Image (spheres, helix red, strand yellow):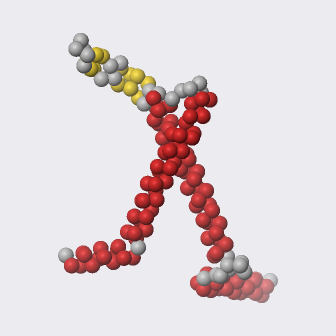
C-alpha cells in the first residue's frame, strides 16, 4: 500500500494530474463561453433569418401525448428533438474552429522557437545540435555523391 501511495504522489507531483486538472477546468469554462455564444449570439439571428424559428423547441413528434379525463397524462408524447441537435452541432463547430485556430497559432510560435536558423529566438541546445548534425550529414552526402561521379 505504501508503494501505491508513493507512486500516486510521484504522479501528482510530476504535473500530469495538475495539467489534466487545469485542462478540465479551462475546458469547462470554455464550454460555458461557447454555450452562451451559441444561445445568445448565434441562435437569435439564425432564428430571425429563418422566420423566428426557435430551434431548441423543434421536434418531430412520433406519437402525440394523450391526456386522461382527470387531466393527468395517460400517454407521454414521443418525439425526436432535432432542435437541440442543431444547437449542439453549432456548439461543436464553434469549439472545433476555435481549437483549430488556437493550435495553429501555438504551432506557428513553436516552429519559430524550434527554427535553429532564426536569430531572434534562442534555440534550445538539443535542437541546435540536431540541426548541426543534419547539416554535417547533408555535407557528407554531398561529398560522397561528388566522389561517386
Vertical arrangement, residue 85 with respect to residue 53, above or below: below
Report which quarter residue 145 is drawn in. Answer: bottom right
Q: Nearer the viewer, residue 84 or 63?
A: 84
Residue 72 visible? The answer is yes
Of the 4 image quadrants, the one containing the C terminus is bottom right
- Counting every numbered tag in the picture gives 0
Report which quarter residue 142 is drawn in. Answer: bottom right
Residue located at (59% from left, 59% from top) = 102
Give left or right: position of 65 versus 27: left
Asked if residue 90 lies left or right of residue 115, the reply is left
Residue 3 percent location from the top left of the image: 23, 79
In the image, residue 51 sits, relative to residue 8, either above or below, namely above
Question: Residue sitting at 73 percent across and 85 percent down?
Answer: 139
Which image quarter is the N terminus in?
bottom left
Residue at (58, 84) in percent of width and height: 126
- Where is 28 relative to 60, above or below? below
Residue under the point 71% across and 79% down: 120
**Residue lying farthest to the top in this orientation:** 69
Q: Position of residue 42 (x, y in %)?
A: 57, 39
Q: Residue furthest front?
A: 40
Image vertical order of residue 122 relative to residue 39, above or below: below
| Residue 86 position in % (x across, y down) | 50, 36
Amino acid at each position: 500500500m505504501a508503494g501505491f501511495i508513493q507512486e500516486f504522489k510521484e504522479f501528482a507531483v510530476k504535473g500530469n494530474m495538475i495539467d489534466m486538472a487545469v485542462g478540465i477546468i479551462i475546458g469547462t469554462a470554455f464550454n460555458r463561453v461557447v454555450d452562451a455564444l451559441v444561445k445568445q449570439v448565434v441562435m437569435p439571428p439564425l432564428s430571425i433569418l429563418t422566420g423566428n424559428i426557435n430551434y431548441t423547441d423543434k421536434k418531430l413528434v412520433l406519437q402525440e401525448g394523450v391526456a386522461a379525463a382527470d387531466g393527468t397524462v395517460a400517454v407521454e408524447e414521443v418525439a425526436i428533438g432535432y432542435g437541440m441537435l442543431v444547437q449542439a452541432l453549432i456548439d461543436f463547430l464553434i469549439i472545433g474552429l476555435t481549437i483549430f485556430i488556437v493550435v495553429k497559432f501555438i504551432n506557428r510560435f513553436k516552429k519559430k522557437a524550434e527554427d535553429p536558423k532564426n536569430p531572434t529566438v534562442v534555440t534550445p541546445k538539443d535542437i541546435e545540435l540536431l540541426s548541426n548534425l543534419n547539416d554535417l550529414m547533408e555535407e557528407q552526402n554531398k561529398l560522397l555523391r561528388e566522389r561517386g561521379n
